[in-house]
């Protein structure tokens, strides 16, 4: 086994050029067998670029390593490369797993790697970071978050902590976070799926899912931080020297470099998703190798003391010459080797692996709550399912995804159409509050277990109803009359349902010819004209927060007569308001009085009359004859 282990290490080391040559191609595509990263805001995560993606100043290898040269898993991938996934198995009890188990990456963990690749490609395209490199490091550091034991938001179900870095076989790193991240106030420990030490996380930590926290135990946050750390200092990972330098900045060990490159190359040839919690767990670790395998030094810069050579078992070998059985005491059987003490933070080799909740669940039972709401309101009951096993017992810790169909405008918080929650101790997974939109219709919410496509979805029926009013009443009783073409006074109407004011009710207003008709009038009053100049005699209105609406802009038509404003609402509410159109008053033209005749001007009666000729009036009454 040791010889084979050495051969595999050498094989990985010689394939470095091939790995570097593949980086550019992997950075430009998702690689064979890869699954595109999610684009539907699952698990509360934000769109690419919306989270914290600010790189600190300085290179990722300045002064130390990301992990403090903590122990790592040394398992190597199989010699046979994985094949591109094909058709999923048809057995209903088998989750969608294709290809060798070693090539399986838990669904949420893989999504985090691919999301980090996309985010860093947007912010630092010259780095050429492929997600397969993050997967290789994640495999070596934590066995892909302990086989994908994460909740729906990507946070580990139990914290992943490395051993105390107390200088006893590891680096000596005194406490730098006062135990805030690792719970150790004496020494630091490596943290989370990507095994950052607290001092490194304090500089490089990211909030990739936009939840307001930089959590090293969250695979989305940790994967993006790891990607940015590897790209630091302007590295181009398509260049072999930069690739090696980036990996060594994570853990300064040539064996670590070789192990990561092996997994990187392996995932580059094909990978597939497995349900969260079902990933293959590694066995060997650099500080705790399996029996019969050589120990891998933690760091070349601070190698551990060489072990004392074991005594040759010559005393147990049979002598080439026959000996006297009477004089030769039988050799004592060798005492069995005590197994290494298991680190409580890592799964032990001999410990039976508990079947994860994702695989234990046999059925999702739809909740019995009636999911009904009126338009624009929050559903009174929450959508929920219960995860049960084959015996009908509740299963806790199951990730359940609730999906709304495209036919509804109802939404979960923040406008989400998909949410993922984890079942509680009762096996119940309850979706957050659902708010109805403005579309009144029935729809179906589907609940599934991510990674278990063979498990039938639970379906929950939901209905959005229109707001109703069983009574519509006009406020005021002033008669409404207007001359043709004139405008009416505004009409205020109040809506009620079961005696209470009814806000948000849709009310239809129609002009009719009489109280006995509900057909639209052809020549009565109107609500104005449309773009083509045609009268509008039907209009949809909505009551305000106080349950009232105002009919404004009503104009009398050109035909005098009596008409009706008919108001109707869902729920039976009706109101009829009389409208009168009057002809404008007319004034007849003035005519002469038949008893009056025009008369002539009277004759002058005195010399002082203005009609007297001025020359006559000025004539003298007597004058001397010119001849006298």
Image: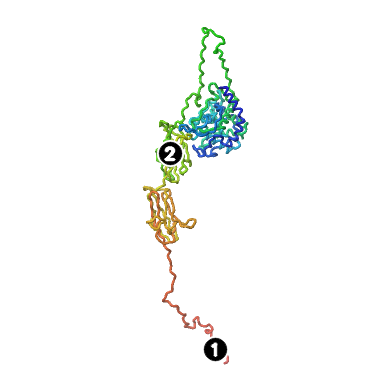
Q: Position of residue 628 (x, y in %)?
A: 57, 92
Outermost residue, bottom direction? 628
- In the rendered image, which residue does mark 2 sit on? 459
Tell me which residue sits at (51%, 82%) in the image. Answer: 612
Q: Position of residue 441 (x, y in %)?
A: 43, 45
Q: Position of residue 304 (x, y in %)?
A: 58, 22
Q: Quadrant of the N terminus?
A: top right
Q: State the CA–CA distance, disc 1 to disc 2.
A: 139 Å
Q: Which mark is residue 623?
A: 1
Is residue 21 among what the camera can see? Answer: yes
Q: State the SS at label 1.
A: loop
- Residue 45 vs 164, above or below: the answer is below
Q: State the SS at label 2.
A: strand
Q: Earlier in the sequence, mark 1 or mark 2?
A: 2
Write down the quadrant of residue 560 in the picture. Answer: bottom left
Choose between 512 and 340: the one closer to the eye.
512
Mark 2: give few (<14), some (14-19) or many (20+) Cα within 10 Å: many
Write down the quadrant of residue 29 in the picture. Answer: top right
């Amino acid at each position: 086994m040791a010889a084979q282990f050495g051969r595999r290490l050498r094989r990985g080391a010689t394939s470095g050029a091939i790995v570097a040559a593949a980086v550019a191609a992997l950075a430009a595509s998702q690689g064979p067998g890869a699954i595109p990263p999610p684009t539907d805001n699952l698990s509360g995560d934000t769109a690419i670029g919306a989270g914290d993606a600010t790189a600190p100043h300085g290179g990722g290898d300045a002064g130390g390593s990301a992990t403090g040269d903590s122990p790592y898993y040394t398992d190597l991938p199989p010699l046979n490369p994985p094949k591109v996934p094909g058709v999923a198995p048809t057995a209903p009890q088998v989750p969608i797993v294709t290809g060798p188990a070693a090539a399986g990456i838990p669904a949420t963990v893989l999504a985090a790697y691919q999301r980090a690749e996309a985010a860093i490609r947007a912010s630092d395209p010259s780095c050429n970071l492929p997600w397969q490199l993050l997967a290789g490091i994640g495999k070596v550091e934590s066995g892909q978050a302990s086989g994908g034991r994460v909740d729906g938001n990507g946070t580990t179900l139990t914290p992943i902590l490395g051993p105390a870095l107390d200088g006893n076989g590891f680096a000596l790193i005194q406490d730098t976070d006062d135990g805030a991240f690792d719970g150790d106030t004496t020494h630091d420990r490596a943290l989370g799926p990507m095994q950052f030490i607290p001092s490194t996380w304090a500089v490089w930590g990211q909030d990739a899912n936009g939840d307001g926290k930089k959590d090293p135990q969250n695979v989305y946050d940790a994967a993006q931080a790891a990607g940015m750390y590897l790209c630091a200092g302007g590295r181009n990972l398509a260049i072999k020297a930069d690739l090696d330098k980036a990996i060594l900045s994570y853990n300064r060990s040539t064996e670590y470099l070789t192990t990561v490159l092996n997994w990187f190359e392996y995932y580059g040839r094909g990978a597939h998703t497995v349900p969260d919690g079902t990933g293959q767990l590694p066995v060997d670790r650099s500080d705790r190798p399996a029996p019969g395998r050589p120990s891998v030094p933690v760091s070349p810069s601070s190698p551990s003391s060489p072990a004392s050579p074991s005594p040759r078992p010559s005393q147990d070998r049979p002598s080439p010459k026959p000996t006297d059985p009477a004089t030769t005491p039988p050799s004592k059987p060798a005492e069995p080797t005590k197994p290494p003490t298991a680190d409580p933070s890592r799964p032990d080799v001999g410990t039976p692996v508990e079947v994860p909740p994702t695989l234990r669940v046999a059925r999702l039972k739809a909740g019995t709550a009636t999911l009904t709401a009126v338009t624009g309101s929050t559903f009174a009951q929450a959508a929920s399912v219960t995860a049960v096993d084959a015996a009908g017992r509740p299963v806790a810790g199951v990730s359940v995804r609730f999906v709304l169909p495209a036919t509804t405008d109802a939404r979960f918080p923040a406008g989400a159409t998909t949410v993922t929650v984890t079942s509680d101790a009762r096996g119940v997974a309850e979706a957050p509050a659902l708010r109805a939109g403005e579309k009144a219709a029935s729809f179906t919410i589907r609940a599934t277990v991510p990674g278990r496509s063979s498990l039938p979805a639970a379906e929950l029926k939901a209905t959005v109803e229109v707001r109703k009013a069983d009574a519509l009443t006009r406020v005021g009783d002033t008669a409404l009359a207007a001359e043709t073409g004139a405008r009416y006074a505004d009409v205020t109407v109040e809506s009620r349902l079961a005696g209470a004011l009814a806000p948000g009710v849709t009310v239809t207003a129609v002009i009719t010819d009489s109280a006995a008709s509900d057909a639209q009038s052809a020549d009565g009053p109107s609500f104005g004209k449309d773009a083509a100049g045609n009268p509008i005699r039907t209009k949809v209105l909505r009551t305000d927060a106080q349950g009232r609406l105002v009919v404004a802009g009503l104009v009398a038509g050109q035909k005098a007569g009596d008409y009706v404003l008919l108001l109707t609402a869902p729920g039976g509410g009706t109101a009829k308001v009389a409208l009168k159109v009057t002809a404008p008053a007319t004034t007849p033209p003035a005519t002469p009085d038949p008893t009056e005749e025009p008369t002539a001007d009277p004759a002058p009666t005195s010399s002082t009359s203005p009609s007297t000729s001025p020359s006559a009036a000025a004539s003298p009454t007597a004058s001397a004859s010119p001849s006298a």
